[in-house]
Amino acid sequence: MSLILIYTIVFCSIWILVFLGFSWTLKNTPQFHKKSENQANSQYNWPSLSVIVPACNEAEHIESAILSLLDQDYPNLEIIAINDRSTDETGGILERLAKTSHDYRYCI
């Protein structure tokens, strides 16, 4: 009878230690809270993001690709387009788009 009592005490002690460890872990886990609308849209809360777009002879699709990137609502988005020795009108399209936006840079 005493052997069963010892096993029961040991088993219950292990479960109590597991529960205490789990409780301690939950207490020390960082909590994420929903931000207010003003905080969520603030540029200071968003990391800056640069999108680099290399293009070589992409005159047919480059304008829609750049306009799609410019249409994003990410507050700290920077778009860098690089013309990689295109022989078509890709460079001209990129230059024209660069004049219309402050978030977009064109590199030759």
Image: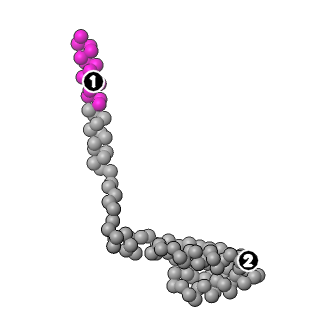
Using the rendered image of the protein, determine whether residue 85 is visible from the camera's viewpoint. no
Q: Residue at x 44, y 70 (%)?
A: 47
Q: Is residue 5 magenta?
A: yes
Image-quadrant location for residue 93: bottom right
Q: Residues within 10 Å of mark 1 (few under 14, many from 20)?
A: few
Q: Is the N terminus in the top left, top right, bottom left or bottom right quadrant?
A: top left
Label 2 sits on residue: 57
Secondary structure beneath label 2? loop
Residue located farthest toward the top when viewing the structure as drawn: 1
Rendering coords of residue 87 (x, y %): 76, 81
Relative height, residue 33 to residue 57 (above, below): above
> Marks 1/2: CA distance?
74 Å
Label 1 sits on residue: 10
Q: Residue at x 26, y 21 (%)?
A: 8
Residue located farthest toward the right when viewing the structure as drawn: 87
Q: Residue at x 56, y 74 (%)?
A: 69
Using the rendered image of the protein, determine whether residue 4 is visible from the camera's viewpoint. yes
> What range of the chain is rendered magenta?
1-15
Rendering coords of residue 50 (x, y %): 53, 73
